[in-house]
Amino acid sequence: MHVFIAGVMQGERRDDQIDSQSYRSRITEALRTHIPEVTITDPFALNPNSVNYEVEQARHTFLTMTKEAGKADLIIAYLPSVSMGTAMEMWEAFQSGVHIIAVTPYVHHWAIRFTATEILPDLETLFQRIESGTLMQSANGDGQGA
């Protein structure tokens, strides 16, 4: 199982900083604990200093990571606020038929609503799904989703 972790990095910021990325390590830890054979692509882990990249390196990173989202078996998109980059990753994954789980309160936002396979309200619900094995069932097409 190849999981791509998408989520807010800069979101609605107007500066060159990033929001807390602690959710990524929490999701990674839960996945590795309960799905030992998982392969994880985490754009932030691969590019922790990306906000400081020169323009060409930043462009290459953005486009490469967006394409990688379409190669995963599952995307977990954490969206406590909106994110244009995550929306693009979700679109790429949607176009490729990837199972997308959005963790967000934005259940009426069309970019989320019409690309996500499932929408979960919060990280705790996601962690419960990982621990119980129902996340894997739905990602493999064996469950009904949320």
Image (tube, rainbow, N blue to C red):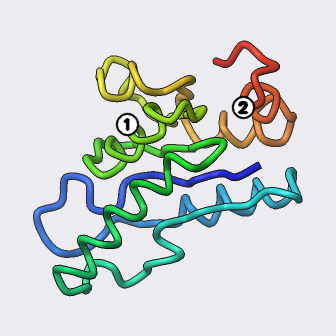
Question: 109 or 57, which lies in front?
Answer: 57
Q: Which mark is residue 53?
A: none
Alpha carbon distance from label 1 to label 2 = 17 Å
In the image, residue 127 sits, relative to residue 29, either above or below, namely above
Question: 62 or 107, which lies in front?
Answer: 62
**Seen in the image, is 144 located left or right of residue 83?**
right
Tell whether label 2 touches label 1 (CB within 8 Å).
no
Quadrant the C terminus occupies: top right
**Residue at numbered disc 1:** 91
**Residue at numbered disc 2:** 139
Number of marks in the image? Answer: 2
- Residue at the extreme left: 14
Using the rendered view, name the quadrant where residue 54 is placed.
Answer: bottom left
Instruction: Tell me where residue 90 appears, x and y as whole percent.
Output: 42, 39
Using the rendered view, name the quadrant where residue 105 is placed.
Answer: top left
Residue drawn 48% across the image and 45% down it: 78
- Amino acid type at circle 1 is Trp
Instruction: Tell me where residue 110 appears, x and y as whole percent.
Output: 29, 21
Residue drawn 33% across the image and 17% down it: 108
Residue drawn 43% across the image and 32% down it: 95
Instruction: Tell me where residue 117 appears, x and y as whole percent.
Output: 55, 23
**Seen in the image, is 115 located left or right of residue 100?**
left
Residue drawn 65% across the image and 55% down it: 27
Question: 1 or 126, which lies in front?
Answer: 1
Q: Secondary structure at mark 1?
A: helix
Q: Secondary structure at mark 2?
A: helix
Q: Earlier in the sequence, mark 1 or mark 2?
A: 1
**Seen in the image, is 62 located left or right of residue 99?**
left
